[in-house]
Amino acid sequence: MANDKTFHGRRVLVVEDDMMIAMMVEDMLIDLGCQVIGPARDMSEAFAFARDAKALDLALLDINLGSEMVFPVADMLRARGIRLIFCSGYGETALRASDSGCAVLRKPYRLHDLAAALADALTGG
């Protein structure tokens, strides 16, 4: 999977408040050939990346950042036409109705789960 060119050069914003998970996700994305933007570890950083990052292909968003929900950042990214993948230990039940249809990675997830979600999001699946 690491030699697969499907994800080569794809720019992925990572929003994750848990440093260990953020590092793991960053390593997985790099193994897949992606360029990692971030990670953003709080809402302030997430808003800055959502506003300023150029040419994002998609965003991988932890739904719960400490005591705040990531949904305002998701709305900003969606307005820019950025595809979203949400990450949560709660699965799809944590999403709002406006987020239905977005991919959800249930924590904990593995490299093949991430690759499948990336593929679906990038192809509009």
Image (cartoon, grey):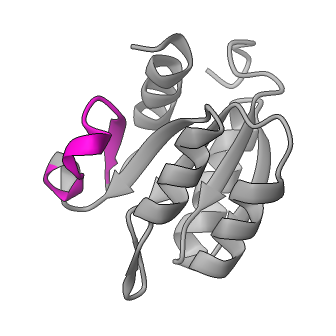
Residue 66 in percent (x, y) is at 42, 86
The answer to which of 71 and 109 lies nearer the viewer is 71
Q: Is residue 95 magenta?
A: yes
Q: How many marks?
A: 0
Which range is magenta?
Answer: 93-106
View extreme (bottom): residue: 67
Compared to residue 11, the image places residue 8 above or below, namely above
Residue 98 in percent (x, y) is at 28, 42
Q: Is residue 75 magenta?
A: no
**In the image, what residue occupies the spot 83% across and 34% down?**
55
**In the image, what residue occupies the spot 51% across and 19% down?**
119
Left or right of 17, for residue 88: left
Left or right of 51, for residue 120: left
Residue 25 in percent (x, y) is at 59, 54
Compared to residue 30, the image places residue 42 above or below, namely below
Q: Hey, which quadrant is residue 52 in on the image?
A: bottom right
**In the image, what residue occupies the spot 13% across and 53% down?**
93
In the picture, the quarter occupied by the C terminus is top left
Compared to residue 27, the image places residue 18 above or below, namely below
View extreme (front): residue: 79
Residue 64 in percent (x, y) is at 37, 72
**In the image, what residue occupies the spot 32% across and 42% down?**
104
Determine if residue 72 is in view: yes
In the picture, the quarter occupied by the N terminus is top right
Compared to residue 22, the image places residue 56 above or below, namely above
Determine if residue 108 is in view: no
